[in-house]
Image (cartoon, helix red, strand yellow):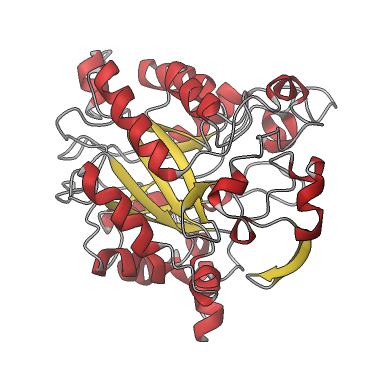
Amino acid sequence: MPRMTDDQHKTGLGRRAVLSAAAIGAGGAVLGTAATAQAQDSGDAAPAHPAAKPGTPGKSRPGGLPVPAIVGHRGTAGYRPEHTFGSYDHALEIGADIVEQDVVPTRDGHLVCRHEPEIGGTTDVADHAEFAGRRTTKTIDGVPTTGWFTEDFTLAELKRLRAVERLPAVRQRNTIYDGRWDIPTFAEVLDWAERKGRERGRPVWLHTETKHPTYFRGIGLPLEERLVALLRPYGRLRAGAPQFLQSFEAQSLQRLGRLGAAPAKIFLLNGLTSQPWDFVVSGDKRTVADLVTPAGLKWIAGFAQGIGPTAELVIPLDATGHLLKPTTLVRDAHRQGLVLHPFTARNENQFLPVDFRTGTDPNAYGKPIDAFRTWFATGIDGLFTDNADTAVLARQDFWNA
């Protein structure tokens, strides 16, 4: 296949069929072979991707996303303390196409950007004697957790804290930034995105997750209404806005849709035996294994435009951590018009399949470019990563192969 131009890459037309692949479909996506977990050994070649549904991101929008798109996970968590403006800025600087936020509420109803409501591991709250009495144990989504929680602090109180590296033993170099940045509100992130968009001459795409929405609704701090109110003044509620909305709970995405949020919604999926927490609460017995079947994907397509599966749902691992054959998940999801943004690609050995590890130090870098290329070859539409620059290089290699 001749090498494609940069413009063709950006609309998805440079996708090469890999792993017994198929053809370029309308809208520019190319599928590799992939199957559901129930049929991973089928060996069937994937069909051409159908035409992208209106509003589906990453295909042929004006100023649209490359395919595959690089999602800066919590900014660029591989290089800066996560969910800080240092992390968000650096994600754009090193090539992320989309920047992710997780939102949780404060006691007085503001949305702030933290991966979890428990902030003992991502801030210096333990160093603040005035907050020692706030340390407690809570059960969130069935898991007892001890620490300090955003919902027990006002925004003014949280702004007295400073962010720190969440994985200091793994990413010791990131600790030089401890204390440099505070906890951003989502309102501040929206202002930042507007400013950066003007500076760059193109919109800044955001990928925003509602965290533990059933839990927060249960304690009187619902996320969806607050999120919609913040997005509306920035034009990020309309279809085609540079915005993804994501959640591990279907009911949260459905509620966002009823509230008028039209941007692409991504349903996040953990391992095959897991259940979304809203399923547990409602008594729905389905697991992720049920949701990644053709019937489950058809159901998801009724309220979402994509899925965010853990990477092992796309290419499973055996008991030793080595890669198995790809499933048909990419093919089956594309047949329903769903895009796929798997999570989370990282550089360190401990986060890579054994096939791409180097040496015995779990914190040393392995061969992530090779790993990222392998995921791209399945036909995914985007990839969450802590290391956007690595993903950009891998994507360029993939395009040029």
Left or right of 106 in this view: 180: right
- Residue occupying image coordinates x 48% and y 68%: 221
- Residue occupying image coordinates x 82% and y 46%: 129
State whether residue 396 is above or below residue 20. Answer: above
Quarter of the image where one finds residue 106: bottom right
Percent across and percent down for residue 133 are: 80, 59
- Residue occupying image coordinates x 32% and y 35%: 205
Quarter holding the N terminus is top left
Left or right of 99 in this view: 163: right
Percent across and percent down for residue 57 are: 25, 42
Is residue 6 visible in the rendered structure shown here?
Answer: yes
Percent across and percent down for residue 74 are: 53, 38
Work out which residue is located at the far right of the displayed protein and give it: 360
Percent across and percent down for residue 136 are: 78, 64
Is residue 67 visible in the rendered structure shown here?
Answer: no
State whether residue 170 is above or below residue 282. Answer: above
Quarter holding the C terminus is top left
Foreground pick, 36 / 143? 143
- Residue occupying image coordinates x 50% and y 77%: 279
Foreground pick, 128 / 217? 128
State whether residue 40 is above or below residue 28. Answer: below
Q: How many marks?
A: 0
Foreground pick, 25 / 85? 85
